[in-house]
Image: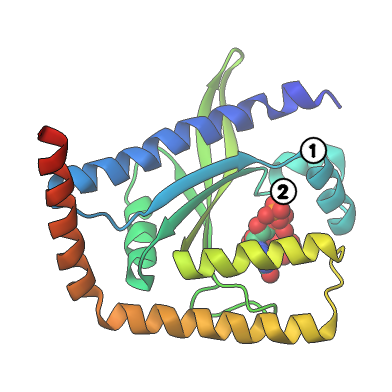
């Protein structure tokens, strides 16, 4: 497998979607002085992870493009839980890609305690051989969910997927605490947003000085 050739369209997709999703954030900031999107990141799955996941799931190399949906991965991080659904809805109304599947691990968390909203899309990318439709996964989650998932991911890596029971139990409790934090913050969302608008305006005034 020539990985550089295989991954080139995925790199293109991640770059293009980062521009588009960051563009949404900027537009919200200009027009509403606030945005449901806190930040956007993107990555192409490292080849070692592609090989490992394909082996674990019994996917043949020729089926990778259709069977491995997260080779191109985007992450949209929001402040509040409501924002997740708002962003997911906006994605559904776009005309530059097609929605293939949605997974709501926000209201229905995974056994690990993982919460996030996944939208799998089919994105048309121009290559030197013409248009190619490539699958990509957009993960939408709050800052608290992201904090938890990042830490759990590191621990999974450290323990090669076999996190000790005591650490696992603590992670579960941390996940519940993160979700309670999200719930509490949602209750004072309006107050937080008003305060942030005032801060943003002050920043703008200082920039102009
Ligand atoms: P990486 O290193 O982030 O690329 P699965 O069979 O559960 O591995 P599947 O069927 O491809 O996953 O789909 P799913 O459930 O939508 O998961 C895809 C990605 O979501 C994962 O990719 C992770 O990024 C994230 N994710 C899913 N479950 C968990 C979890 O329990 N903890 C954390 N931290 N992240 C999770 P990869 O390839 O597993 O990992």
Residue at the far top in the pictured view: 128
Location of residue 117 with respect to 53 vertically, above or below: below
Residue 52: image location, x then y, percent: 86, 50
Give residue 182's mark.
none
Using the rendered view, name the quadrant where residue 108 is placed: bottom right
**Residue 168 or 20: which is nearer the viewer?**
168
Location of residue 200 with respect to 95 vertically, above or below: below
**Residue 145 or 15: which is nearer the viewer?**
145
Picture quarter with the N terminus: top right
The residue carrying pointer 1 sits among few (fewer than 14), some (14 to 19) or many (20 or more) residues within 10 Å by Cα, namely few
Give the side of residue 62 with respect to residue 36, left or right: right
Can residue 103 be seen here? The reply is no
**Residue 8 or 186: which is nearer the viewer?**
186
Ligand 1: quadrant of the figure: bottom right
Question: Which dot, 2 or 1, sits closer to the camera?
Answer: 1
Give residue 68's mark.
2
Whether label 2 lies within 8 Å of ligand 1 gets the answer: yes
Which residue is painted at 18% across and 74% down in the image? 191
Give the side of residue 184 with respect to residue 148, left or right: left
Which residue is painted at 69% across and 68% down in the image? 152
**Mark 2–mark 1 distance (CA, rounded to whole Å):** 12 Å
Residue carrying label 1: 47
Residue 39: image location, x then y, percent: 41, 50
Using the rendered view, name the quadrant where residue 94 is placed: top left
Can residue 164 be seen here? The reply is yes
């Amino acid at each position: 497998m020539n990985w550089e050739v295989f991954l080139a369209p995925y790199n293109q997709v991640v770059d293009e979607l980062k521009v588009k999703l960051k563009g949404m954030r900027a537009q919200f900031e200009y027009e509403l002085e606030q945005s449901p999107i806190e930040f956007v990141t993107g990555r192409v799955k490292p080849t070692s992870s592609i090989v490992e996941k394909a082996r674990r799931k019994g996917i043949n190399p020729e089926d990778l493009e259709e069977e491995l949906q997260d080779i191109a991965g985007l992450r949209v991080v929001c402040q509040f839980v409501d924002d997740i659904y708002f962003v997911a809805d906006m994605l559904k109304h776009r005309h530059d890609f097609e929605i293939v599947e949605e997974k709501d691990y926000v209201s229905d968390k995974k056994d690990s305690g993982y919460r996030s909203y996944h939208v799998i899309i089919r994105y048309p990318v121009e290559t030197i051989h013409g248009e190619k439709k490539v699958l990509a996964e957009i993960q939408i989650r709050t800052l608290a969910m992201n904090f938890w998932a990042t830490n759990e991911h590191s621990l999974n890596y450290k323990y090669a997927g076999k996190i000790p029971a005591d650490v696992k139990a603590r992670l579960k409790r941390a996940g519940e605490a993160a979700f309670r934090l999200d719930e509490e913050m949602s209750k004072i969302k309006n107050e937080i947003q008003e305060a942030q608008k005032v801060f943003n305006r002050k920043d703008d005034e200082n920039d102009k000085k």
